[in-house]
Amino acid sequence: MKKKPFDTFRTVLSGVKVPWIFMLISIVTQFLLANAMIGTAVLTAAVVDSHGNLKTMDLLKYIGLLLGSGLLATAGSFCNALLSERINIGVRSKLWKKLLRLPMRFYDAESGESLVSRITVDCSRASAFFGVIIMTLASLYGIYLAVKSMIGFSRTLTLWCLILVPVVAVGVALSGKLVFKAQNKLFQTQADATAYLLERVKNLRLIRSTNMSDNEIGFGRARFSAMYRATIKAMLCDNLMASFIAVTPIALIIITFIVGSILYAKDMISLGEVIGFYTVSSMASIRISALITAYGDLKAADGTFEKISNVLKAEEETDAGIPLELPDDSLVFEHVNFSYKDRDVFRGLSCTIPVHRVTAVIGENGAGKSTLFKLLERIYEPNAGTMRFGTRNAADFQPKSWRKAFALVSQDRPLISGTIRENITYGCTRQITEAEMEEVAKQAGIWDLVSSLPDGFETRVEANGGNFSGGQRQCIAIARAIMRNPDYLLLDEATSNLDARSEKEVSEALANLMKDRTTVIIAHSMSAIARADYIVALKEGQLEAAGTPDELSKTSSVFRNFVQSHYMPQEA
Amino acid sequence: MKTERTRNRDFGKGDWKSYFRLIPYIRLPWIAIAVAFIVEMGYSEVMAYVPVSTSALFSGEFTGKALGEAVVYNVLNFALMFGSLILTSWVSSAAVRRAQDTLWGRMLRLDMAYYDTRDPANLMSTLTNDTETAVKSLISQLVSLIPAVYYLVKVCLTLNSYDWRLLISVLILIPLNVAYVVVLGRWQYEVNAGIFGRIGKLTAYLAERVSNIYLIRSYTNEKKEEENGLNAAQGLYDAKIRAAKVSAVGNLAGNVMEVLQRGVPVVFGMILLQQKIINMQQWVAFFLFMGQIITKINNLVGVWGGIKSAQGSAARMVEILKAKEEPQKNGDGQKIVRDGDLAFENVRFAYGEKEVLHGVSVTIPQGKTTALVGRCGSGKTTLLSLIERLYTPSEGSISIGDTNITDYDLCVYRDHFAYVQQDAGIFGGTFRSAMTYGIDREVSDAELENVARQTGLWKLIEALPDGFDAGINISGTSVSGGQRQRIVLSRELLKQKPVMLLDEPTSALDAMSAMNIQQMIIDLFPGKTKLMITHDLRLLAQVDNVIYMEDGQVKDSGSPEELMQRCEAYRSLVLCDEEVCA
């Protein structure tokens, strides 16, 4: 239990270059600063005791100390920023590299948003941790110096002030717990309200057409009220804690001046010493509250480090295996079981994707057609059973070189933000000539589009290709697949996103792409079946039937249903 | 994402007018504000007396009276400070809540056209962040601006009573301080904007890539993406370092300021002390005042910057509050919809500048099934939106029977329709809540089961341990697109409305299910008016009536056979599809 924080700490920082020199400078400046502050207090005492007959030397010293402290503080905070930003970018890079190499199953378990915030938010918090450590050290040293100087002014007064320590500490610790709880509750209500509002704002049409506006006003009000209550509670807890801290200076005045006046009357202490003591003890109280804050930050950092290290410790996708340099061969599933986190897909699937042929995969929604593609590409590995490449186990090959043999044209979200060129050459490692770009664009049927755009291939594509029509997006994705020149082509046919004319354009581009390749199509239309010379029909996680269309029309009810539902009853 | 945000920030440059115009729109809790104001005034009063009472002690007057006074004033000061802190944040939280209520109510009633050009994420951040920024700033100005000025005046008078030269030494420093805060503030604002931009870039990049991780894997592009990610992170790093440099320069300048602010008056006070113009107690009080004044002045200068940055937020709020609301009713608004043929008469409609319907005249016969066909962008969905009165035609009229649809009370009118929207969404909750959203009668489990069987949802629900009470994520992301569409269909079927508007109701389903469900809708509701947008040309044999649209106009309408015979464009649309299917 005790060892765990240190473990996560090491996991997160191993391999990250921590600029220790900046850390050292930060600590040294903080220590010097603490000394300078005490120095000012001592000087103030001297000024008071001089009764107006101030030495010029002391005045200069006072100004010098002020200036010096400022310089030190500036240097310290600059070093601190450098330190934390260096670490920040180090951890960030490491985490991103790791994320790119984690198996897909990892992504199923965590929402994308939380993974992104791991890199953006949590890394910043983790790097702030060093600042907290420096502050802790500085506070401890500052307290030590202040107490030493307090004792120097008056031992008796110091002892009296010690009464305060347990009172404040207990109060702060208790209220600190309340603050933590109240803050959590506040975050929760805020997150709840944000999620609610975002969902509703995105779909106002639904609210309108279902006449739900009045109800939604009520739902919204409930969220705002919850947020309001949580805010008030958090604010009260905050102020409770702050008042425990703020009570110290008042108590210090009372103790210092009551006890001080008695000692002064007995001539055991000078006026300057009382004031000096008061100044130094206030410094100590500030340091103590800084220490308390630092403690809270340290505890919070603990959770952050654990979150990051959980990602870093997760097992990476293997990169082992032999490169795939054999001539194309059939792909064979043998008794494959596969399930996602919460959903079974295949139970004992056995089927063959024959080489150099066009295979159509059919089945109802949820029969596992898309999953089949993911297994073919080895984006996922089966839970049980094997996939073979001819006679060899597919798992023997290096995943990267395996995937290089495939290209996928998918129906949903085929594009990413960037330029058209970046989208077409996505995943290409070699240099692509303009002539080649043009050739590919022509084959994919987008040359007319590209040449009509003022920026040509450099035209921006917005996130998810939002600024292009469905047909254009598909064709750009097809161009990307042509550029990849794969041995195996995987087509996830668009359903009804396209109207008839666009569908024709896309299908022409596809025909170009499919030439001389082993092709697998997730089929939604008869045209796909017409292209196929082999059909795989899936049903309830298993193979229902496989063979030529003629064979399947006799053996497969899935196939017969498919044909029937695409049959045109009304022939002119 | 980032460009959207900066654009948003630009449009909300803000001005003083909209900042104050906010006040009449949101019901501010004026009594609570007044109480907070009084407490804040008390705090200023006491705070101005604390140095005077404490300085007696510091100058060696250790009498019971001096000690008592110092303690009383310090305790009072402390109590009032917390009192005003708590009150102010209480008041502003209450005001924020009221503002959010008002704004949300308004957003739910705004004309749909308002949303066409706006990003939902921005609207949401106006509702959450902008209200908080603007209202909090407004409240804090109302409560504490006058007390702060009052405090400064009072301190100046006190110092003047010691010696006028003390007052001068303070006043000289004020413009210097203001200049420092303003210049540095502007510089820092720019640098921070740079950081926000970079954070936005990094986040947008990561969010897109993480949700497209399958593509990265599939195209083995990890190396390149790794580089891109590092570049985005490097951009943020550079911006942060620039900020650190700026704040280092700022710190140095601030340090010089502090030396001036503390050192000069102290030395000056010393000289006055030596010349016996002021006494020891006055010098100590002066010294203590200096600390307070500097903080107060900085706060006051900060007020200016605070208002400046809240102005943008206020402007964005006012824009929503001022925007046009949906026309709820015309005159008294008729309360009962008499069913009849739906007729469009020379209807024109434009989204902003772009006209999408150019004079549509067509009739949708009551109690019949009508198919609405045409290529993408021909205006089919817009036609449905106009029937639903989500938008108002810019010209022409729509009527049911012989009543113009705008004569009906809006809620009553919309209650006449079931509407399956294109890519229709659901709200998170449970299957039950999603299926009965907008239905105010009690729906029995038997009824739910029945409709779930019709839409092919029952097999899924049956398998769930919690059945209809099984949870669904926000926006329905935990169910597949096909399932989502089946839920929407169930919901609209449950409503049992006289008219059904269906905008590609089965686009996410496999062909077999799509066919079955559309068939079911036709068979099950023979007496209802059904208007269906479809790309599924097989369905056309089943319908009574077809409307063919092209480029924002109705090219022809009639029975499918008639259209096949006389409408060339329609025929080519159907045949082209057949060709692909053959």
Image (cartoon, grey):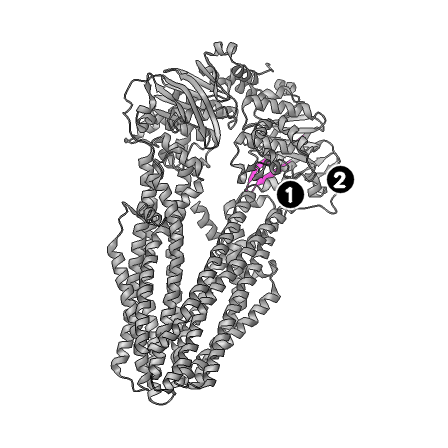
Q: Is residue B14 visible?
A: no
Residue occupied by mark 1: A212
How dense is the environment of label 1, judged by Cα within 10 Å: few (below 14), some, or many (20 and up)? some
Residue occupied by mark 2: B336
Q: Residue at x 51, y 77 (%)?
A: B45
SS for dot 2? loop
Residue type beneath disc 1: Met
Q: Quadrant of the N terminus of chain B?
A: top left
**Count of labels in the image:** 2
Question: What percent of the width, then of the height, locates residue A99?
Answer: 36, 39
Confirm whether the magenta stretch covers residue B356: yes
The CA span between labels 1 and 2 is: 19 Å
Q: Nearer the viewer, residue B402 or B210?
A: B210
Q: Nearer the viewer, residue B359 or A4?
A: A4
Q: In the shown orientation, is residue A19 left or right of residue B288?
A: left
Question: What percent of the width, then of the height, locates residue B302?
Answer: 44, 66
Q: Is residue A305 visible?
A: yes
Residue A10 sits above or below residue A36 on the image: above
Residue B324 sits above or below residue A33 on the image: above
* Region rendered in magenta: B347-362
Q: Nearer the viewer, residue B407 or B300?
A: B300
Marks 1 & 2 on one chain: no
